[in-house]
Amino acid sequence: MNSAVPLKDHWKEQKLFFSRLVAAGIIILALTGVLVWRLVQLQVVEHESFAELSQGNRLRIQPLAPTRGLIYDRNGIVLAENLPAWELTVTPEQISNLDFRLQSLGELGLIDPSSTENLVELVGSHRGFERVKLTNLSEVQAARFAVRRHHFSGVDIQEGLVRNYPFGDLTGHAVGYVASISSSDLERINRRDYAATSLIGKSGIERSYEVTLRGSVGYRQQVVNAQGRVLLDSVEAENTLLSSDSSQGGLETRWPVPGDNIFLGLDIRLQLAAHRALEGRRGAAVAIEPSTGDILALVSMPAFDPNSFAVGLSRADFQKLNNDPDKPLFQRALAGHYPPGSTIKPFLGLAALHYEVLDPDRRDMCPGYFILPGTSHRYRDWKPAGHGPIDLHQSIVQSCDTYFYQLAVKLGIDQIHGFLLGFGFGERTGIDVMNENAGIIPSREWKRAQFARSEDQTWYPGETVITGIGQGFTLVTPLQLAHATAVLATGGQRFKPRLVIATEDAVTGVIAKPEPVLLDVIGNVEELHWKRIAQAMIGVTEETQGSGQTAMRGAQYSVAGKTGTAQVFSLAANEKYNAEEIDERLRDHGLFIAYAPAENPTIAVAVVVENSGGGGATAAPVARQILDAYFLEDPNDSEKH
Amino acid sequence: MTLRSIEMGIGPWALRTRGIVIDVPILLVTVSIAILGFFVLYSAVGESLSMVLRQAFRFGIALMVFGLIAQISPRLLRIWSPWIFCITLVFLLMVMARGEFGGGAQRWLDIGIVQFQPSEIMKISVPMMVAWFMHERPLPPTFKQLLMLLLIFCAPTFLIYQQPDLGTALLVMFSGGLTVLLAGLSLRSIAILGVLSLSSIPVLWHYMFQYQRDRVLTFFNPESDPLGAGYNIIQSKIALGSGGLFGKGWLNGTQAHLEFLPERSTDFIFAVMGEEFGLLGLLLLLGLYLLLVGRGLYIASQAQDTFSRLLAGGLSLTFFVYVFVNSGMVSGLLPIVGVPLPLVSAGGTSMVTLMAGFGILAAIHGNRKLLAT
């Protein structure tokens, strides 16, 4: 063929095409043969066994629910358990006129009428043969339904387990809760795993360790007749040792595997102490073991009762919780953003020592305000008359603002930023539960990235000044504060905070205790500098002028601490702060960080009390309660709570 | 209708009355299959007459489409091919774009009064495009042309797969691939392609959605997952197997009537038929399907130009793949992909495209020019 103009050779092409058609025909016949052979195999050769499965009888697969793992505190006290309960269920394919049935159930007081719409959606998202749990019933309700059962074909009562939290709101935020699987949950889970389970972890440990706690589903096979009566059951067949009988040959049981039990680092005694001390307030408290990162207490107030979710919360009740202005569902300890106020001072003092920007023993004059050279604006000290001549030690003990204004200016914002990052501020700590916030440690670069308008992107020297007392852009979470305090306590070792310290295989009883994770070591800061800051923090609680002295008076252990008061509301230049006159929500937040015993720390604490005024007066007493519970109570007494 | 057409020399069975083209064998067999389907459907949906009437109405529309397309001359079909292909591709992209913004699976496009799935039309426009591309070129295609052809049918396949609709994507790929094979690939090229597609399996696996992977895994061992993806296949095998040689009789299938068999009116209707009409019923149905495929291949062999030949052959083979994939998955030979049983499963769009395809076959056969012999 000429290469320039490829011509079509019609006769040759037709021949080629024919050969292809013939080949295709042969393949089609061969494939049809395979298909027919398969059908003969199913419908003639194996007909008997399939007919047995189908004729008159039917094989039904009933999923078996695994038992959810238990959650314990560090001393083995149960924080989450499973109790027997009655569950109201429907089988979608057996029910006609679902709306009407649900309405009737509502009239009987068995389900919440306002949830009908959700239930219709939930039932609709399941396959016809899957049993869907509607709600839990009390014993009285179960009895009420039992006598009317014949009116409700397709609706049934089954025995189940309901999650119970013995300590109620005491552990609501830390442990989290389980609740009915919602249609949005269905999108992120493999529904096979929940064939027999109607509850799923929604927050806290229950959510983050869902896979560990859940276990894996099993099933039993049943032969039922056309009326749905069970004729043979794989579980019963095993029990009566008839499984060798050939008539039940096909029936098989796969037992569910219970979920792992989880041990938390929490100590319920500290949890209780913190909860009581914060009762009636908004705030958070976190206690950490510095040498491991184990969380000893994690409290966010106001709290909520996780049990109400597990048994089923009516829509109205949920709305009430969700719309409460005090936000009881908000996990303040992990996600609350607060200005650290003066609690940032020990860290900045350490930075100043490390970078040698000042002589710690020199006493600078504090006239009660600070003026940036070349400007006129007065940055005021909390003490209008001033502290007089004051050194670094006393500036931390008395919480002198003027000293730290100039200290911050000497350090510069970028040095401050870099040093604070080393303590875990400004990023998520990596704690083993979800919904943690990262906080903000500002820098020039941060501000450039944060704002759209170019005039907002410039870093102003005044912004460095107020960063020195933990105001301005700086935001931290209570967890970050406790975490950083733990780093101060260990002299630079940063362990990843964790709630779970061990898991126990429920079948074998084997306990796995993962090692604490050392994230980082601040190794370049001299021992001497750590000691100096520690001395100053001990001074806070022990010296007469110490801002935390009142709260720690009489403690039988030594405490290194620091108070903080964070402004929520900016005052005009010559206005005086008057708590009485200011709306409660605009009052200052009180903060306190501490570790103890000061010489050999085993616990680090951070407390934030929202809109409470000074940290020494409101937050430090909460920390005192936690520390007293930790050092003074005998662990063996804990049963009484 | 008279048989004057035979006198006119258009050939046996192809009627031409005052210029109207009707392919009698195709018409008879498709109507037989559809009527058989109505009975099975009536049983599968729990003896609901309204469902069957709706299906009959859809089939009526499909028949009209069949009749209309049969009148178009193959020359016009050829000239339109690239346009039809490009427009369908644009529709497909529009559906994709809307899916991106709307979230979730999107297959439908709403143009004013008509709502349709562009992916369905691709089953026809892809073989048309392939046949058009090879029409003026000598067969077999060169390697360069082969790459172009690959692009023609792989691009829409990929788009449809993204919707995600694995079943339709596979059928579109087959409709293009089989047409290319008919164009006369050398055995060497077929071997290379085979190796290539085998080696692409891990890549494909990587991009599959979890539920699609589950289906493939369950295919190899359905009993491993009786609560999830394995449920369908276990139940459909019981339905088929218990039907035996003669079946349990119409309306007597327990698997279907006691609602054990899922998707029994759509993808799994083959199992309902097997349960109630037994092996003999299924053989009758398969026989009818083979008649259609055979008629299509005969038309391809009689066609007068490359375009008609390739298109008729491609459409016929695709139809067989349709039948084989559905019956294969229901009987546990193939993994479960969402492919309906042609002309029997409830649903309108696939019926219309199928009959449109047969319309093209009728058009190719009925509008041949008379050649001197």
Image (spheres, rainbow, N blue to C red):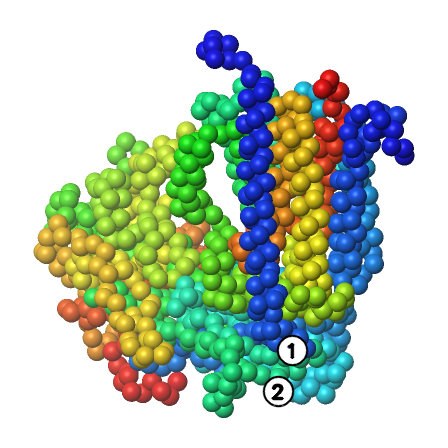
Residue B242 falls in which quadrant of the image? bottom right
Residue indicated by mark 1:
A57
**Nearer the observer, A617 or A18:** A18
Q: Residue at image x 67%, y 46%? A: B290
**Nearer the observer, B111 or B144:** B144
Looking at the image, residue B175 lies above or below residue A60: above
Callout 1, which amino acid? Asn
CA neighbours of label 1 inside 10 A, class few (<14), some (14 to 19), many (20+): many
Q: Determine the residue located farthest toward the front in the rendered image.
A: B373
Q: CA distance from mark 1 to mark 2?
A: 35 Å
**Nearer the observer, A146 or A292:** A146
Number of numbered discs on residues: 2
Callout 2, which amino acid? Glu
Residue indicated by mark 2:
A139
Chain to which mark 2 belongs: A
Left or right of residue A45, residue A440 in this image: left
